[in-house]
Amino acid sequence: MTWSSPPTHGPLGDALAQLAATIEHLGYDDGMHQMLATARREMQVSVPLRRDDGSVFVYSGYRVQHNFSRGPAKGGLRFAANVDLDEVRALAMWMTWKCALVDVPYGGAKGGIAIEPRDHSERELERVTRRYTSEIAPIIGPEVDIPAPDIGTNEQTMAWMMDTYSALLGHTVQGVVTGKPVSLGGSRGRTTATSRGVAHIALMAMAAHGMRRDGTSAAVQGFGKVGRDAARFLADAGVTVRAVSDVDGAVYAHDGLDIARLGAHAERTGSVVGFPGAEAMDTTGLLTLEVDVLVPAAVEGVLTADNASHVQARMVIEGANGPTTQEADAILMERDVVVVPDILANAGGVIVSYFEWVQAHQAYQWSEREVNDRLEERLTTAWNDVVEYAGTHTLTYRQAATALAVRRVTQAHRQRGLYP
Ligand code: NAD
């Protein structure tokens, strides 16, 4: 991206539009705007893979470090066929705001490989992960940039990354990634942290807007690491989860899906499709279903100018990063639909990643109760900060959350000064 011709659409267009509006609200100058709009460091690598049949295919990989003002860069690694540099840039920028908003001492980063993981064997995914890790090894590390799981990656991916990085350095470096298996220095509670956070924020938002748990219905898009347990936690709290989708299809039950059984079905078959006792439905229809709360927890850009005016939910809780385009955001605001932004709603993952990194430094493991209590405490603080700022300045939750985050990053940047 060059500063003179930034994209106006797609995830990066959305992220830059949010930043531009925030800069205007905060009254910052053009120099600061440029500092915050551009990544400090970007790396693009070729990732050759020797497939199980002996053939070779070369994938494109990326690591973008958007900001380091508040500490090492932090952000997930995504395996998805349509990953490109601009998407990774947007996700890295959102990570900077997220870390600042929940006050963990990190900047923001993101990585990706343009690969469809479902087309590859476990052994191929291991080789791709290890080769990518060795390519980006010069710019990651516990004090530099700490990857974590995102779409298409998991704790096994993180174990391979840690092992590869450790082999290159000649000693075990647990703090180089988070989201590792607990047996390798992962944190208790990390696998469910993002979902626990989504549900915790959703329940606080519902309470703040006078919605009783037992009278509230919800639909969740995405049934992966975030969506599945978010649906489960919401159902456990008394919310009627009527519909859930994944990339293959959607299922609906008016009186509520049995999420534990649906989870077991998805585990067994690889999809929510065909869940006994539920009706099949169109995946796009899920976003405009008659429910009180909509939780997009799959991919970015799903709420658009085309469907935002048909959303029937009173509240959108952004489990995914960037699910609402700038056009949809304006329509939802106009229609008084409450949108709780990604940088707040899904911040539980990075909070417990931070706890994992702290535990690696302490060489000590916390109990799951301790992790969950501290997670909820931090999210509650961030929620209260956002509600207060939004109320004081008459802003949406997204505008308030972004303003708080950008202000914190700017403060750190100003205190450190510009070198040379
Ligand atoms: P995942 O790969 O575990 O799951 C993604 C899910 O979305 C799968 O069920 C997939 O089938 C589904 N999906 C993909 N495209 C879809 C579509 N068009 N319609 C419906 N479903 C679709 O990924 P994840 O880790 O759950 O991440 C989901 C979102 O949450 C992403 O935006 C990610 O950046 C964000 N996020 C993840 C974490 C984390 O800790 N994993 C933390 C913060 C934010």
Image (tube, rainbow, N blue to C red):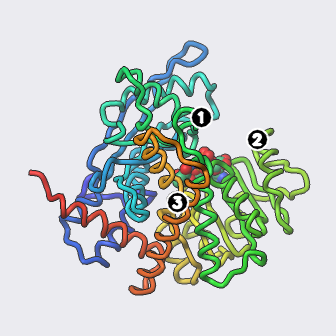
Q: Which residue is mark 2?
A: 267
Taking depth in this image into account, of 50 and 101 the one nearest to the observer is: 101
Looking at the image, which residue is at 62% across and 83% down?
Answer: 209
Q: Which residue is mark 3?
A: 374
Please tell me which of labels 1 and 3 falls first in the chain: 1
Looking at the image, which residue is at 69% across and 81% down?
Answer: 211
Q: Where residue 343 sits: x, y (%)?
A: 47, 63
Decide: is 197 above or below 333.
above
- SS state under label 3: helix
Q: Quadrant of residue 304?
A: bottom right
Q: Where residue 126 sits: x, y (%)?
A: 54, 25
**Label 3 with label 2: CB-CB less than 8 Å:** no
Q: What distance separates the C-alpha of mark 1 from that of mark 3?
A: 34 Å
Q: What distance separates the C-alpha of mark 1 from that of mark 2?
A: 17 Å
Check the image and name the residue furthest to the left. Answer: 420
Please tell me which of labels 3 and 2 falls first in the chain: 2
Q: Nearer the viewer, mark 1 or mark 2?
A: 2
Q: Which residue is mark 1?
A: 117
Q: Where residue 78 sits: x, y (%)?
A: 50, 42
Q: Amino acid at mark 2?
A: Glu
Q: Amino acid at mark 3?
A: Arg
Q: Amino acid at mark 1?
A: Pro
Q: Where residue 391 sits: x, y (%)?
A: 45, 86
Label 1, residues with CA under 10 Å away: few <14, some 14-19, many ≥20: some
